[in-house]
Image: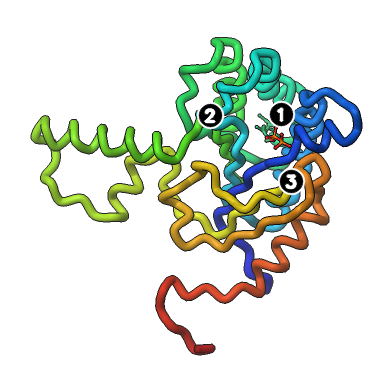
Amino acid sequence: MAKIPQTMAIIMDGNGRWAKARNLPRTMGHKKGADRVRDVALEANRKGVQKLILYAFSTENWKRPEDEVSYLCKLPGMFFNKFIQELMDNNIRVTFAGELEKFPESTQEVIMKAINQTSTNTGMELCLAINYGGQREIQLGIQKYAAQVAAGLRKNDLSIDEFSRYLFVPESIDLMIRTSGETRISNFLLWQLAYAEMIFTPTAWPDFDEAALDECLQEYEHRHRRYGGLDDED
Ligand code: FPP
């Protein structure tokens, strides 16, 4: 049987360069990118991935020009209008990771609506990392824990597993993919990527289709994970 990552995370990079290469505005790269979210989510679900986390908006993305930020804020609404029925039909459950409250109310509403509508689905969890930053996630987790210790609700005895539960994403990641050639993790899931397999592909996100995902899954199947120890093949 194929070895499938239970938890998979993707840095969807290269929308801007994809658009520029076609003399299109950057926003058209993001639009095409949102369609790829549909393709890749359905394929990951078909293959048996349990949780797919997509880096849709980082805490640093607010620095982009106003019109691009405004377009990125509208994308979740456009995406769910177009694809919510397909997500339902495929039993996919939507969640998010990040500080949603910093988005315009209309963006928060469409995301919460999709979360509520899909909440009883039992297939793959599609988690949108939005206004997400790995350092910020750890900072918030520490603050929450410290507040509980100060209030006498907890002893100062935190284990690594327990700390994970103070984060937006408690699971560790099996496979991380970054598209478009950059070989960085850009503040994504810093804690959860501790033992992740990583694949950096030159394909731009708007060109990353089902076949491209299948290739990554095949490569993952051949990776030899040791978690710092040794196994029978060593
Ligand atoms: C990085 O490419 C991509 C983003 C900052 C946005 C990613 C968002 C999507 C793919 C769509 C999200 C969909 C939903 C459902 C919310 P870039 O703009 O940095 O590309 P570049 O490095 O080529 O400039």
Q: Relative to the observer, which residue lies in front, 106 or 219? A: 219
Q: Indicate the amino acid at tag 3.
A: Val
**Color scheme of the displayed model:** rainbow
Q: Residue at x 55, y 48 (%)?
A: 185
Crowding at dot 3, Cα within 10 Å, few <14 / some 14-19 / many 20+, comes out as: some
| In the displayed structure image, the side of residue 43 where residue 92 appears, left or right | left
Mark 2: give few (<14), some (14-19) or many (20+) Cα within 10 Å: few
Sequence-wise first label, 1 or 3: 3
- Residue at 49% over, 42% down: 187
Q: Name the foreground residue: 72 vs 167.
A: 72
Q: Nearer the viewer, mark 1 or mark 2?
A: 2
Image vertical order of residue 215 relative to residue 14, above or below: below
Residue 60's place in the image compared with 106, above or below, is below
| Residue 182 locus on image (x, y percent) | 66, 49
Please name the amino acid that badge 1 sits on. Answer: Ile
Q: Amino acid at mark 2?
A: Glu
Q: Is residue 187 visible?
A: yes
The residue singled out by tag 1 in the image is: 84
Looking at the rendered structure, the secondary structure element under dot 1 is helix
Location of residue 106 in the rendering, given as x and y in whole percent from the top left corner: 60, 11
Residue bearing mark 2 = 60
Question: Residue at 53% of width from left, 33% of height from top?
Answer: 96
| Disc 3 target residue | 40
